[in-house]
Amino acid sequence: MTAPFDLVLMTDDHSEIDSIAEQAKLAEEHGFANVTMGETTGWNIVPVLTVIAERTDEIGITDDVLSPYARAPTVYAQTALTMDEITDGRFRLGLGTSSPALAERWHGGEFDRPLRRLRETIDIVHEVYEGGSVTYDGEIYDLGGLSYERSIPDQPPAIDVAALGPKGTELTGRFADGWVPQLFTVEGLEDRLADLRRGAELGERSAEEIRVSPLIRTFASEDPDRARAVAKQMISFLIGAYGPFYGNSIAEQGYEDTVAEIRDLWENRDTAAMAEALPDDLLDSVAAVGTPEDVRSKLDTFADIEGVDAIRLGFVSGMSQEDKEFTMTAVEPMIE
């Protein structure tokens, strides 16, 4: 089947902004619907996305994702509305709670009540969207007395949320326009979609209004063994070392012992053993890796899930530019 495909750019793979902009242009040429990237402790991605917007014509532009600990909610509203103008309406605002490490050790805050903070951030962005002025008396934020000084479009940018747990996904269903899950098995994603639908019902809206685009780590290659080995390195790192949430989610999907083993190995920074400890069935359950035929088959499986609207294709750390172009070409027949 065909479906809209988004592409996640790997900022760490690029030493210059020109290079990542060229990757975005390639994504547009291959027919991807949106291009996106994350922000940790490297580039501030808002100006990078601005460069991409200036060098592309039609592809949607978004972020994967910005944290309420990094900027004020009103700044996110300003950012989204400014990017909407720069992109001629091609921008979507991506938000997520991020991780304790980034919130505390980079942004200097305390990782307290993350879902409440995310909820209030969405509320405030919507208040700006609805008329410019903000009068908000929340549990985290108390704002009022100033207004956005520029005009607001009839259709302001959509808000996507990256969430893994049931409460975060329910919150997404109630208040956001899109959901971006990552590292889910088919069964795990189907279970979590029930939480999204419950949230939509609580928000008195239809779940069909919410764009669901699971992020699937993807590596198509004529050397499938190499692709699998490289993917295992990244996914085991996400599970064992990259904050607690990916590992917790994988454990809840039936891999508790695997997650515990990989986390123990991370204590000694034994990344080779971490990759070896990742079972083949887990890799094949959450990623699309192998021959082009293997990759298309796995992506089809996710695209066929009821409630999934698009696939967000994520590269794997360690892929060369040639690998990326081969992978984009391999999935191009699937792109709507």
Image (cartoon, rainbow, N blue to C red):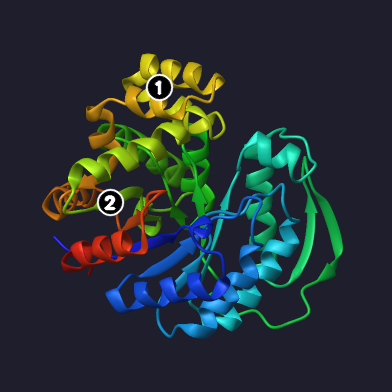
The residue tagged with tag 2: helix, strand or loop?
strand
Residue 285 lies, in percent from the top left, at 25, 35
Q: Nearer the viewer, residue 317 or 176?
A: 317
Disc 2 crowd rating (10 Å Cα; few below 14, some 14-19, many 20+) is many
Q: Residue at horizontal 43%, vertical 85%?
A: 57
Q: Nearer the viewer, residue 311 or 262?
A: 262
Whether residue 214 is situated above or below residue 149 in the rendered picture: above
Residue 255 lies, in percent from the top left, at 34, 20
Residue 251: mark: 1
The image quadrant that residue 58 belongs to is bottom left
What is the three-letter code of the residue carrying label 1?
Ala
What is the three-letter code of the residue carrying label 2?
Phe
Residue 173 lies, in percent from the top left, at 46, 47
Q: Is residue 242 visible?
A: yes
Whether residue 157 is situated above or below residue 190 in the rendered picture: below
The image quadrant that residue 250 belongs to is top left
Disc 1 crowd rating (10 Å Cα; few below 14, some 14-19, many 20+) is some
Whether residue 277 is situated above or below residue 121 in the rendered picture: above
Q: Nearer the viewer, residue 119 or 291?
A: 291
Residue 28: mark: none
